[in-house]
Image (tube, helix red, strand yellow):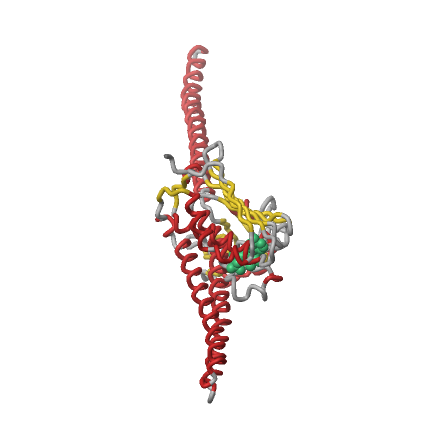
Amino acid sequence: MSPTLTITTSLLAGIAVGVPFVLWLRTRSARAKEATAWKERLESDLQQARNERDRLLDALSDAFLLVDAETDIRFVNAAARELFEGRQIVGRPVREAFLDGRLADAVLQSLETGEPVRSRVVLPQQASPRGDHETRGVNAWIIDAARLPDTPADHPLTRVVIRDVTSEHQLEQIRKDFVANASHELRTPLAIINGYLENLLDEGMLDDREMTRRFLTVMRKHSDRISRIVEDMLVISRLESGEAAALKLEPFRFRACIHDILERLESMIRQQTAEVTVTMPDDTLKLNADRFYWTQVLFNLVENALKQNPHKGLRIEIGCIGLPEGGIRIWIADNGVGIPSADLPHIFRRFYRVEKHHSQQEIKGTGLGLSIVKRAVEAHGGSIGVTSTPGQDTRFTIDLPASVRAVE
Ligand code: ADP
C-alpha cells in the first residue's frame, strides 16, 4: 500500500471514530447543561413554593408550628416567632421551647396518640410563651394540634395552632363577675326585706302600728335600692349592647342640662348647704348628643360629690368650655374627702366602691354610677379622667371630640 493511501485511510478511520465521539461529547455536555438548568429551575420552583407557603403561613394571625415525631419544632410562622419573642425555638423540643408545661401538654398528647387535640389553657401572664414578667393578670390560649395527613408514617409531622383568646377570656370573666356582683348586691337588700317581713308576720306584730310603720319604712328603703341597682344595670347593658350606636343625638344647650340636674338635686344641696358654681364662658354652647345620658352623667358626678361629703362647707364646680380645636371640655370638681390614689385606677369599674365609704354608703350607692358615666362618655367618642387631692380638689374631666359640639 502506498504511504498516501495509508495516511488517507488512517485519517478516514480517525474521522470515523472522532466525529461521533465529538458529537457524543457535545450531546453529553448539552444534556448535562440541560439537566443542571432543569435542576436549577426545579430548585427555584421549589424555593418559590416554599416562600409562597411561608408567606401564607406568616399572614396567619395565629401562631403556627410544625413538630416532628421526636417532639422537635421544625417550622414556625411569623406569629409564632413573635409569640416566643426573640427565643430560638426551631430545632428545640416542645417541652423546652414552651415555658410552661401546661402549654406543651396538648401538643405532646397529640404527638403521642396521633389524635387531634384541642384545649384551652389559662396561664398567669409570666407563664405565657412571651415570658412576660412585667404585667399581671392572665393570658388564655387555645392550642389546636393535629397530625398532618400526608406525611410519611415513619416521619409524621404535627401542626400546632396557638390562638390568643385573652381578650375573649377577659370579657367572659367581666360578665361572670358582673353577674356574681349583681347577685350579691341584690341579695343583701332582699335578705333585709325578708327578715323584716318575717318579723312582721310574727304573731301580734302587726298590732303595733308604730313598729309596723318603722319596719315598712326600712323595707321601702331597701326596695328602692333594688330598683336603683336594676335601673343602673339596665342603663349599663343598654350602653354595652351596641344600642349605644343608636344614641338619640339632638342638639341641646348644656346649660339647660346643668339646670335640670341642679333642680333635681336641690334639696340635697340645700340640706348640705353646699355651694355650687357653674363656670361656663359661653352659656349658649350646645352639644349634639343624647340628652338622657348627659343628664345621667352630670347627675351621677354631682350627686357623688354631695353623697361622699355630707358635711358642711362643700364646694362643687361644674365647668364647660369649647376647646380651640373644636372639642369640648367638661369638669366637675369638689373640695371634699377625695379618693385615695390607690383607688383611682379602679374607680370606673362596675360595683367598685372605696372601702372606707362602704358602710356609710351601704344604702346610697350602687357602685355603678361611675361605670355608667364612663360608658356614656365613651359612647359619644369622649374620654374621662379623674384626679384627687383629698380635702382640696377632686376633679373629673371629660374631653369630647368636635363632632359632639353642635353648630348653630
Ligand atoms: P356609688 O354608686 O357608690 O356612688 P360610683 O361608681 O358612682 O358608685 O362611685 C364609686 C366610688 O367612687 C364611690 O363609692 C366613692 O367611694 C367614690 N367616689 C366617686 N366620686 C367621688 C367624689 N366626688 N368624692 C369622693 N369619692 C368619690
Q: Position of residue 158 (x, y in %)?
A: 48, 54
Question: Total label count?
Answer: 0
In the depicted view, which residue is nearer to us: 75 or 360?
360
Q: Height in image: 264 above or below 40?
A: below
Dividing the image into 4 quarters, which one contains the C terminus? top left
Q: Height in image: 35 above or below 50?
A: above
Q: Is residue 96 visible?
A: no
Residue drawn at (48%, 62%) of the image? 178
In the depicted view, which residue is nearer to us: 63 or 262?
262
In the depicted view, which residue is nearer to us: 55 or 112?
55
Q: Height in image: 49 above or below 202?
A: above
Q: Position of residue 263 (x, y in %)?
A: 44, 53
Q: Quadrant of residue 401?
A: top left
In which quadrant of this rendering is ligand 1 seen? bottom right
User: In the drawing, does residue 329 fall left or right of residue 137?
Assistant: left
Q: Is residue 178 visible?
A: yes
Residue drawn at (61%, 47%) of the image? 393
Dividing the image into 4 quarters, which one contains the N terminus? top left
Residue drawn at (45%, 57%) of the image? 146
Q: Quadrant of residue 27?
A: top left
Q: Position of residue 363 (x, y in %)?
A: 52, 66
Q: Position of residue 251 (x, y in %)?
A: 36, 42
Q: Quadrant of residue 10?
A: top left
